[in-house]
Amino acid sequence: MYAAIATDLDGTLLDAGETITTFTAETLRAAATRGIELIIATGRHVRDVRRLTADLGVPISLITTNGARVHDSDGTLLFAENLAADHVRTLIQPELARGSLMSLYLDDRRLSCVHEGYELREGEPELGERQADLSQHSGEGVAKVLYTGRPARLAEIEANIRQRLGEQVAVTYSQPDYLEVMAAGINKGQALSSLLARRGIDLAQCAAFGDGLNDAEMLQVVGHPFRMTNANPRLTALLPRVPEAGHHDEAGVAHQIRKALALI
């Protein structure tokens, strides 16, 4: 049995309606009653995660913003790392962000700006308070810069970022149309390793579930990694030997946990 379980949200724990189903919630509660440490590890803002997990009624530690923030199960902030302000000022310039919806993740809110060439889509997800222009933002207090757009355009933005900033920032994708930039060294694997060390739990005793490229480091450090059947093909190519845990819209995570707990 696992000593800890860490799971991504979108495309992993959440169903297609972006909810935690009753079946999955009951499974997490069963794991918690057996003393298993539960951890959410996501690119989302901590406010979103708290809203999604509020009704579970079990202690859950939160790794959010791809590892730039870590909160204990009682809400205590354990770790925070922001992008350097001068790096943010580079990342938010319109000529770099052209063709994207750009969002800045701050502790208390998210700010977003639509750049030239980006077409707002029906049902566009709410990614923060819309601003007409963010190019003059100070760059202070930003945990993550997110670009939403067509994969081809995001690839161009990524290449531009790597040319300008190189290894000074961490770059990843949570979904093919979400390009995410954090401070160098920030990822879910690093955050999970630090959190479990604080708990005195060996990584070899931890299970982790994910579907995106931003889950790669987390799946590489734990003893029991699982990628979803619906995982990004690039993640599958990167970690071909990691076993599958089923589809996110068929409660794949919950079924794997129940199997480990002998509940099926």
Image (cartoon, helix red, strand yellow):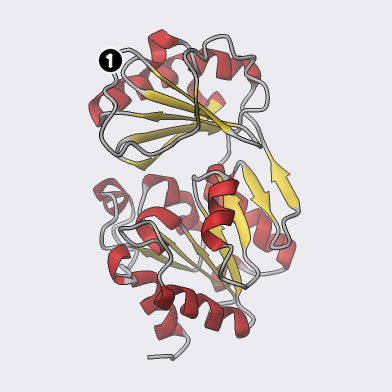
Q: Residue at x 69, y 63 (%)?
A: 73
Q: Observer-nearest residue: 13 or 186?
A: 13
Q: Is residue 219 left or right of residue 238?
A: right
Residue 114 in the image: x percent, y percent?
A: 39, 20
**In the rendered structure, which amino acid carries the disc numbered 1?**
Gly
- Regarding residue 11, the answer to whether it shows in the image is yes
Quadrant hosting residue 158: top left
Quadrant hosting residue 148: top left
Residue 96 in the image: x percent, y percent?
A: 40, 13
Residue 108 in the image: x percent, y percent?
A: 65, 36
Residue 189 in the image: x percent, y percent?
A: 54, 52
Q: Residue at x 25, y 29 (%)?
A: 150
Residue 86 sits above or below residue 150 on the image: above
Q: Observer-nearest residue: 27 or 262?
A: 27
Q: Quadrant of the C terminus?
A: bottom left
Which residue, given by chain and number where applicable, does mark 1 sit on? 117
Label 1 crowd bin: few (<14), some (14–19), many (20+), radius 10 Å: few
Question: Tag 1's secondary structure?
Answer: loop
Q: Is residue 123 left or right of residue 96?
A: left
- Regarding residue 247, the answer to whether it shows in the image is no
Q: Is residue 46 left or right of residue 133?
A: right
In this rendering, the count of numbered labels is 1
